[in-house]
Amino acid sequence: MAAGSPAPATTAYLPVRARWLARWREEILDPELPIVDAHHHLWDRPGWRYLLDALLKDLNSGHRIVATVFLQCRAMYRANGPDEMRPVGETEFVNGVAAMSAGGTYGPTQICAGIVGYADLRRGARAREVMEAHLRAGGGRFRGIRHISAWDSDPALVNPANAAPPGLLASRAFRDGFAQLAPLGLSFDAGVMHPQIPEMTDLARAFPTTAIVLNHVGTPIGIGRYAGRRDAVFAEWAAAMRDLATCPNVTVKVGGLGMRINGFPFHEGAAPPDSAALAAAWRPYVDLCIEQFGTARCMFESNFPVDKGSYTYAAYWNACKLLTRGASAEDRARLFHRTAAQVYRLEIGLG
């Protein structure tokens, strides 16, 4: 199967249509602005391959991507050994990609300069052994754990590959595992849906010294029983985000709004949306995040290739640049690269 092959149509993901994406035409805005893509994946799945060559095509589409952060996605697990240690294979794989990139053969971008992996935190204190194995495998690049906890009473809204039980973040076993992060200098990436943001706030208050990164602006849902209720969902989401913003240990990834779960109809047009259309749809969410958390606690993320079913990589970054046109140079630097570099402790070259 060719690199960058179309994604299969599933209940969890929008299909990636290469011919449709090729219809996008737009000038690259502010091409010299340094960017750290704070959230992307690499995988080789039946019907969908997104490995280094496919990622490079997106990275080289016009914007100045100086570094990236890889987020766990169940890729390249070990085939053998204890079940709890098999996710370490993903870190081994990604660190190999990072090492390939580090020599400059594939361009100046520091690909996978930061790695976030998976450990089952429900193992309690025993999860520390898995975290330590990730650290050994990560070549100095391993930065944190993501244990997706997205849940809704409607099972059709939940990715079956990442199904979580209700109340996971409050469970004793999970919190015992979560407590192992800070002593190892690791952060936590949170994958929840918007009704669960209050649970995230409770967790953040219980562990004020653990750095938490909320993925995809908390995933405001726009399909299923939430369809046709965008204003009401926004009000619920905004209230929860304002409360979460009172936790100084929480940072927000601004992106991920091209997923099926969000319900935006970007994929329904005859051609991919331009950056102006994306910026108009996202402005209320982006403005509230920046207003409540500040630019020092917000970072942009592509969430590719998941969001590639809705728009091109270049269009996403153009939209982010439009959304920040009135911001100061300092605020833009934080949003596009500085916050991500600080949270994930990346040494990025901007020369």
Image: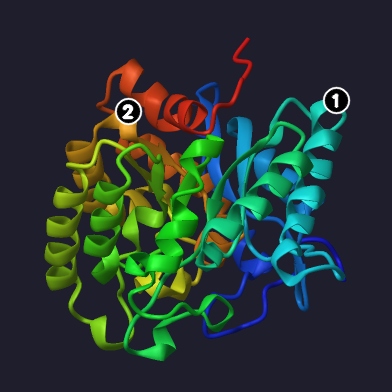
**Badge 1 element:** loop
Amino acid type, label 2: Ala
Residue marked by disc 1: 103
Amino acid type, label 1: Gly
Say left or right for 125 vs 255. right
Residue 174 visible at all: yes
Q: Please tell me which residue is depicted at 41% across the width and 89% down the height of the picture.
A: 155
Residue 147 coordinates in the image, percent (x, y): 51, 62
328, 241: nearer the viewer: 241
Q: Quadrant of the C terminus?
A: top right
Number of callouts in the render? Answer: 2
340, 18: nearer the viewer: 340
Residue marked by disc 2: 296
Residue 22 coordinates in the image, percent (x, y): 64, 59
User: Gap between marks 2 and 1, in whole Å?
Assistant: 30 Å
Say left or right for 318 vs 242. right
Type of colouring: rainbow
- Asked if labels 1 and 2 touch by Cβ distance under 8 angstroms, the answer is no
Residue 12 coordinates in the image, percent (x, y): 52, 79
Q: Is residue 337 above or below residue 181?
A: above
Q: Quadrant of the N terminus?
A: bottom right
